[in-house]
Amino acid sequence: MQTGEDEYTGQVAGSGPAPYQVTINLSHPRRSRCNCPHADGRRVICKHMVALFFTAFPEEAEDYIKEVEEYEREEERRREEHYAALRSYVKSLSKRELQEQLFEALSELEEMGRGFDW
Ligand SMILES: [Zn+2]
């Protein structure tokens, strides 16, 4: 609930049995308070403050979620492009080059302790 001009207070469930008492100050974020172990007595932003903010402003939460989803789609596209490039690179190699690359890759895996069982 709103407790000041730019201040909101609420309870946010945490990992402990009792919910945390959280106060966020929109114009002075560092005056926000929460009694969780991470933020208690310190001038830091914790996830409970973020949760309270998104509870008080569901529209901002929606925008934020959309942004995250857009970012994830973008990442997925980049990953697909990367693997497509990798695939056409592999296709461009000769058998001899493939054998060398495969040998190097397997050797690297072995050095990382994830070798094949022959
Ligand atoms: Zn907290």
Image (cartoon, grey):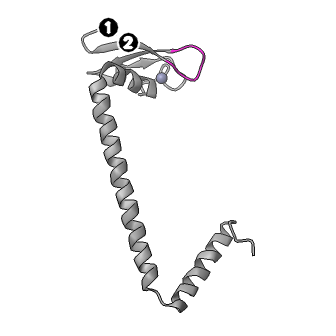
The mark found on residue 3 in the picture is 1
- The x, y position of residue 100, in whole percent, is 57, 86
Q: Nearer the viewer, residue 4 or 108?
A: 108
- The x, y position of residue 106, in whole percent, is 63, 76
In which quadrant of the rendered view does residue 32 lie?
top left
The CA span between labels 2 and 1 is 6 Å
Q: Residue 51 lies in magenta, yes or no?
A: no
Helix, strand, or loop for circle 2? strand
Q: Residue 16 lies in magenta, yes or no?
A: yes
- The x, y position of residue 114, in whole percent, is 68, 66
In which quadrant of the rendered view does residue 64 lie?
top left
Kind of residue at badge 1: Thr
Q: What residue appears at the point 39 percent right and 27 percent down from the top-left corner?
A: 50
Q: Which residue is mark 2?
A: 9
Q: Are marks 2 and 1 in contact (CB under 8 Å)?
A: yes
Helix, strand or loop: magenta stretch: loop
The range drawn in magenta is 13-19
Q: Is 37 located above or below residue 3 in the figure? A: below
- The x, y position of residue 103, in whole percent, is 61, 82
